[in-house]
C-alpha cells in the first residue's frame, strides 16, 4: 500500500499519514498506542494525559484493562519500540501480540492492537496479523487489519486529534471504572 489516502476519507488522516512517513515532518499530534487505548477507555483521561498531567502508570489496574501481566503468558516473544509511537511484542511466527489480563474491557486493547497493525502497514508498509490474548480466560483472538478495521482505526485517530486539540477536557461523565482511575481526585473532588 503506497499511497497516502486514508480508508476513512478524512483529509486530516491523509496529512497525518504523510507526516508520519516523512522523518522531517512531525504530525500535529504524536499518537501512541496508549493514547488509542485511553481514547476508548475515557476521552477525558486522554485529554489529561495529553496535557502532561501525569500519574503513576505502574500501578496495577486490572479492571480497566491497562495492566499487562508479563509473566502470565508463556509465548516466546520479542519487544520492539518503533518511532517512539508504538511498543509491541512480536511472536516467533511474526504475529503481533497484545496481552490483557481481563476481557471485561475488550475494545481498548483491541483498538490498540489494530493501531499497531495500521501503523506498521500504513507508515512502514509492513503487513502483520495480530493476536489478542486473555490468559486468565485461556482465550485468544486473531485480529486482522481490513478496510473496515483500518477505517475504524482512522476514525479513532481523528477523534484523538479532536480531543487533544480541544482547549478543555471533555465533559465529566461517570464511568464504571472511575473509582479505579488515578485521575479520580481531579474529576470528582
Ligand atoms: S475519573 Fe472517570 S471521568 Fe475522570 S478521567 Fe478517570 S475514568 Fe475519566
Image: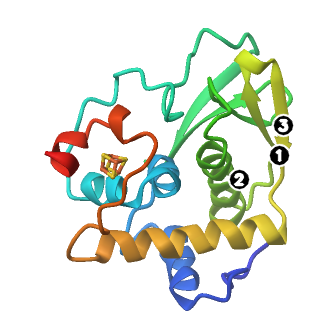
- Quadrant of res 29: bottom left
Neighbor class of circle 1 (other Cα within 10 Å; few <14, some 14-19, many 20+) is some
Q: Please give the residue where the numbered disc 2 appears in the rendered image.
A: 117
Mark 1 lies on a secondary structure that is loop
Q: Please give the residue where the numbered disc 1 appears in the rendered image.
A: 129
Residue 55 on image: x %, y % = 23, 36
Residue that sits furthest to the left in the current view: 189
Mark 3 lies on a secondary structure that is strand
Pointer 3 with pointer 2, Cβ within 8 A: no
Of pointers 2 and 1, the one earlier in the residue sequence: 2
Residue 17 on image: x %, y % = 56, 75
Q: Answer with left or right where residue 8 lies relative to residue 143.
A: left
Which residue is pictured at 68% across the width and 60% down the height? Answer: 118
Of pointers 3 and 2, the one earlier in the residue sequence: 2
Which residue is pictured at 70% across the width and 14% down the height? Answer: 73
Residue 179 on image: x %, y % = 34, 35
Q: Answer with left or right where residue 29 lies relative to residue 167.
A: right
Query: Which one is nearer the viewer's eye here, 72 or 24?
Result: 72
Query: Which one is nearer the viewer's eye here, 181 or 25?
Result: 181
Q: Answer with left or right where residue 120 lies relative to residue 51.
A: right
Q: Which mark is residue 141?
A: 3
Disc 2 to disc 1, C-alpha distance: 7 Å
Pointer 2 with pointer 1, Cβ within 8 A: yes
Can residue 4 be seen here? The reply is yes
Amino acid at each position: 500500500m503506497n499511497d497516502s489516502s486514508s480508508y476513512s476519507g478524512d483529509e486530516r488522516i491523509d496529512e497525518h499519514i504523510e507526516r508520519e512517513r516523512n522523518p522531517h515532518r512531525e504530525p500535529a499530534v504524536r499518537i501512541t498506542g496508549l493514547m488509542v487505548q485511553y481514547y476508548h477507555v475515557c476521552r477525558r483521561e486522554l485529554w489529561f494525559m495529553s496535557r502532561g498531567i501525569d500519574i503513576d502508570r505502574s500501578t496495577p489496574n486490572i479492571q480497566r484493562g491497562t495492566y499487562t501481566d508479563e509473566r502470565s503468558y508463556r509465548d516466546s516473544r520479542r519487544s520492539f519500540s518503533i518511532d517512539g509511537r508504538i511498543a509491541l511484542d512480536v511472536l516467533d511466527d511474526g504475529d503481533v501480540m497484545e496481552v490483557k489480563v481481563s476481557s471485561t474491557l475488550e475494545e481498548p486493547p483491541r483498538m490498540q492492537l489494530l493501531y499497531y497493525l495500521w501503523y506498521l502497514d500504513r507508515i512502514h508498509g509492513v503487513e502483520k496479523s495480530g493476536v489478542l490474548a486473555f490468559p486468565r480466560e485461556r482465550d485468544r483472538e486473531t485480529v486482522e487489519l481490513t478496510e473496515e478495521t483500518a477505517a475504524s482505526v482512522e476514525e479513532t485517530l481523528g477523534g484523538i486529534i479532536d480531543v487533544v486539540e480541544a482547549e478543555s477536557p471533555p465533559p465529566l461523565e461517570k464511568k464504571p471504572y472511575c473509582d479505579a482511575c488515578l485521575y479520580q481526585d481531579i474529576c470528582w473532588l
